[in-house]
Amino acid sequence: MIPRYTRPEMADIWTPETKFRIWFEIEAHACDALAELGVIPKEAARTIWELGGKAEFDVARIDEIEREVKHDVIAFLTHLSEHVGPDSRFVHQGMTSSDVLDTCLNIQLVRAADLLIADVDKLLAALRRRALEHKFTLTIGRSHGIHAEPMTFGIKLAQAYAEFARNRERLVHARKEVATCAISGAVGTFANIDPRVEEHVAAALGLAPEPVSTQVIPRDRHAMYFATLGVVASSVERLATEIRHLQRTEVLEAEEFFSEGQKGSSAMPHKRNPVLTENLTGLARLVRGMVTPALENVALWHERDISHSSVERGIGPDATVTLDFALVRLAGVIDKLLVYPENMQKNLDRLGGLVHSQRVLLALTQKGSSREEAYSLVQRNAMPVWRGEGNFLDLLKADPDVGAKLSAAELDALFDLGYHTKHVDTIFRRVFGPDA
């Protein structure tokens, strides 16, 4: 985790202190269940909660023990015994390390998902507000980076809203996917621990029992989780890239907010660069880069190995922390985005009316021209305009072959920009509901 791209709420999930507290709760809840089943004394379970619950787990002390025993869970249990005393012998009865490690990881991923879902909610709110603000702000739509046909800036933002609404659903599903608990012992057979212990721990921690754990929780769950983070990151990049293009000097239809006293370049005082969205593009690459290792973690040897462990120690914190930061930053960019409708209009007019070529084409076919003939007529008048040699409407009116099909008044009507906004309300109702 890089402090520059880390928010404390997400970072706290991955601290050693949080991890050890979760480990303790898993062990203590298991002790409660074991006590109810008569496997350990109920008084011992109460003591474990009382003394362990008050304990301040010393990370340095646990690390010191681990340097000797070369095992992180044993080091923790040894330190816990220093707080709990003799009753600590009842901790970890019939359990294996993966019961603690995997259940803890899933709790951390669930908590991370909750923050990411909240982040998306903030982004959705910003997108909705700005989309409604610019519902009928005319702009040029582009395909292949080239002027295509008129649309509205609100539609651009509505598209992003719909995409992130889908991403929210994906995150909710990913959260459910990893919200499982495994307390099944060595090779997952429950030979030394009753399945009811797992059910109790799962219920206490808001998880579901893993149907078949094989000692570890199957990593296809985690692969799907991190793949979902990669998809969300790609959506972040898509919107960030759109803003970067719109901020280019030759376009300048929108740009990132530029605060008082902000500097754009160490060499050129005039610069206002899209640094936030460029940063978001890079952060998205980082998150996606962690998807492949998660996919490769699925194939473990037999019932378990630990080839996944080192990977997850890295990608668990880094992917969630990075995406959390990116989503919050993107919400801020959208919330304060500077929008220039006058530049949008200038760009609409830039090609001398060529953006209406399809309407003319269709009108000619309605008047009896074949599509091939109509296309040829429109294109031969469009290409001079493309080269800066005249105005499209004037050239069409001067073309006798076009005039034989369409009157000057009919041609004028085909250049009405309002024609392209007639279904905006329909799109907005589909995206935002009937109140849009």
Image (cartoon, rainbow, N blue to C red):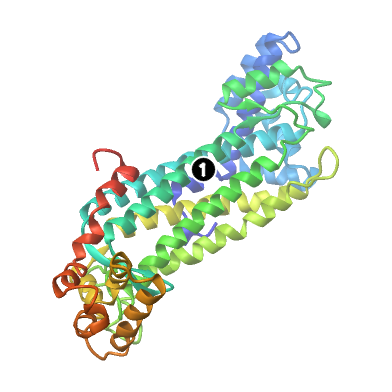
* Residue 357 falls left or right of residue 326: left
Residue 400, visible in the rendered structure: yes
* Residue 113 falls left or right of residue 87: left
* Residue 233 falls left or right of residue 105: left
Secondary element at image label 1: helix
Camera-side residue of 379 and 75? 379
Within 10 Å of disc 1 (Cα), the crowding (few <14, some 14-19, many 20+) is some
Write the residue at 77% across / 42% down. Answer: 71
Camera-side residue of 86 and 289? 289
Counting from the top left corner in percent of width and height, residue 135 is at 23, 54
Q: Report which quarter residue 39 is drawn in.
A: top right
Q: Is residue 123 above or below residue 403?
A: above
Q: Report which quarter residue 362 is drawn in.
A: bottom left
Counting from the top left corner in percent of width and height, residue 326 is at 44, 56
- The residue pinned by badge 1 equals 170
Give the residue type that dot 1 points to. Answer: Arg
Check the picture and name the quadrant holding the N terminus: bottom right
Residue 336, visible in the rendered structure: no
Q: Is residue 265 above or below residue 319?
A: below
Q: Is residue 278 above or below residue 435?
A: below
Write the residue at 27% across / 61% down. Answer: 153
User: Tag count in the figure?
Assistant: 1
Camera-side residue of 364 and 316? 364
Check the picture and name the quadrant holding the C terminus: top left
